[in-house]
Amino acid sequence: MKRYYFLASLLVLLTCFESFGQFGMPMGRGGMMGNPYGNPMRGMNQFPSRTQEEEPLTAEDIVELSINRVKETIEINAFEEAVLRSIMLEATKKRIELQILNLEPNAMKTALEEIESLEDARLENELPPALYAHLKALKEERNPKTKRKKEKKKKSKTKT
């Protein structure tokens, strides 16, 4: 009989260790049959975190997006597309270089205006007039230069 008690207690002891490994320590840090390292359901409800930050677009990517936007509105042939791509790529690379330099606001503004005027001059010289006019209209539509000023409302004081 003692032998059966010994085998039964040995069986219970061995299954306890196995259950501890499977479910965690009972009444431990994780609670009754819980995870000793915290709530196991907590990690399941969280969205996976982004390990990589989004990389900034390269000049080629920016130009490709711009070319696609132009292609959606007007048909251009392969030669016009190549000319447009080369001019826009050069100007975009210069703009990115200016952003890297972190110049003062006034110097940055004058440099960007100079790049834009050179780009406009090259586009006007190398593209057909109809396509240039359409590109200029697209640029004005996308970036209007005139900003509307909000009018401040004056509070009227009433005597009571």
Image: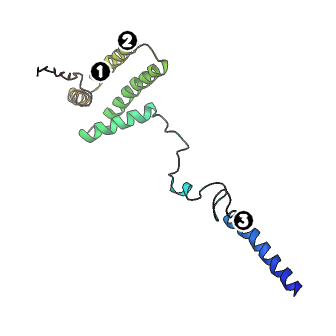
Q: How is this picture coloured?
A: rainbow
Q: In which quarter of the image is the C terminus?
A: top left
Nearer to us of marks 1 and 2 is 2
Q: What element carries label 3?
A: helix
Query: Residue 137, located in which quarter of the rendered image?
Result: top left
Q: In which quarter of the image is the N terminus?
A: bottom right
- Distance from disc 1 to disc 2, alpha carbons, whole Å, reads 21 Å
Which amino acid type corresponds to the residue marked 1 in the rendered image?
Answer: Asp
Name the residue located 25 percent from the left edge and 29 percent from the top edge.
Answer: 135
First along the sequence among labels 1 and 2 = 2
Which amino acid type corresponds to the residue marked 3 in the rendered image?
Answer: Gly
Which residue is at the far bottom? 1
Disc 1 residue crowd, few under 14, some 14–19, many 20+, Cα 10 Å: some
Tell whether 30 sits left or right of 45: right
Name the residue located 64 percent from the left edge and 64 percent from the top edge.
Answer: 32
Q: Residue 120 carries which label?
A: 1
Query: Residue 12, located in which quarter of the rendered image?
Result: bottom right
* Residue 36 position within the rendered picture, expressed as x and y whole percent measured from the top left: 67, 57
Q: Is residue 128 placed above or below 37 in the rendered structure?
A: above
Which residue is the site of mark 2?
106
Q: Nearer the viewer, residue 50 or 143?
A: 50
Name the residue located 40 percent from the left edge and 28 percent from the top edge.
Answer: 89
Nearer to us of marks 3 and 2 is 3
* Residue 121 position within the rendered picture, expressed as x and y whole percent measured from the top left: 29, 18
Q: Is residue 46 placed above or below 79 in the rendered structure?
A: below
Q: Is residue 81 placed above or below 8 in the rendered structure?
A: above
Which residue is the site of mark 3?
21
Nearer to us of marks 3 and 1 is 3
Tell whether 81 sits left or right of 37: left
